[in-house]
Amino acid sequence: MTDLRNQVRLASAIAKCGRDRVWVDPDRVGDVASAVTRADVKRLISGGAIVIRPARGVSRGRARERAEQRKGGRRRGPGSRKGAKFARLPRKDRWMRLIRALRDELRKLRTDKKIDAHHYRDYYMRAKGGQFRSRNHLLSHMKTEGLLKEAK
């Protein structure tokens, strides 16, 4: 086997990459071996006898798999948690998620004519005051007060 260390070194210097990214065509080893100067090596790179391979990155496959598992609730136990409860999901974010859901539900009930504007405003203010834990809690409260007849 011909020693092509010098040509590979020159090619990596020219391409500003590591030696492991330099590939020499096994069918044209003789041409590469005869190259002595940087100009010769440049000519071989443009001619295709020496190819600079693309840089290898870090595979995202395992990260995607972990993310998929987290979506299903895996890998979220106490041993995986770093921040405090409200650092992971701040109180304000939790509140915004709840109040938006409640207001959406109230708006829908009003547009479907299941509650009138007076009851809408009453329940809107109750929701703002933090009376309801969830959408279901709001609906069950309305049913017990006799506002909603049909099952939701």
Image (cartoon, rainbow, N blue to C red):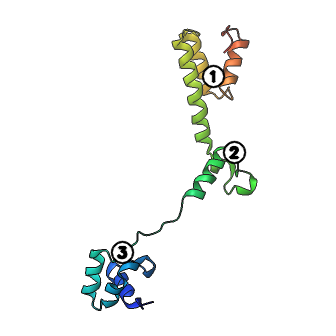
Name the residue carrying label 1.
126
Kindly indicate the quadrant of the structure image that contains residue 14: bottom left
Q: Quadrant of the N terminus?
A: bottom left
Name the residue carrying label 3.
51
Kindly indicate the quadrant of the structure image that contains residue 144: top right
Indicate the position of residue 8 as horizontal and vertical percent values: 39, 85
Marks 2 and 3 in Cβ contact (< 8 Å): no
Q: Secondary structure at mark 2?
A: loop
- Rounded to the nearest angstrom, the CA distance separating label 1 from label 3 is 70 Å
Crowdedness near tag 2: few (<14), some (14–19) or many (≥20) residues, C-alpha within 10 Å? few
Task: Pick whichever, 4 or 30, lies toward us.
Answer: 30
Q: Which mark is residue 73?
A: 2
Q: Quadrant of the C terminus?
A: top right
Kindly indicate the quadrant of the structure image that contains residue 55: bottom left
Which residue occupies 31% across, 85% down? 31
Mark 2 or mark 3: which is in front? 3
Does residue 24 show up? no
Question: Does 140 appear above or below 38?
Answer: above
The answer to which of marks 1 and 3 sits earlier in the sequence is 3
- Rounded to the nearest angstrom, the CA distance separating label 2 from label 3 is 46 Å
Question: Does 123 appear above or below 77?
Answer: above
Crowdedness near tag 3: few (<14), some (14–19) or many (≥20) residues, C-alpha within 10 Å? some
Question: Does 24 appear above or below 68?
Answer: below
Q: Which residue is at the far front? A: 27
Q: Is residue 140 left or right of residue 64?
A: right
Task: Pick whichever, 3 or 77, lies toward us.
Answer: 3
| Amino acid tagged 3 | Val
The answer to which of marks 1 and 2 sits earlier in the sequence is 2
Mark 1 or mark 2: which is in front? 2
Which residue occupies 61% across, 32% down? 98
Crowdedness near tag 1: few (<14), some (14–19) or many (≥20) residues, C-alpha within 10 Å? few
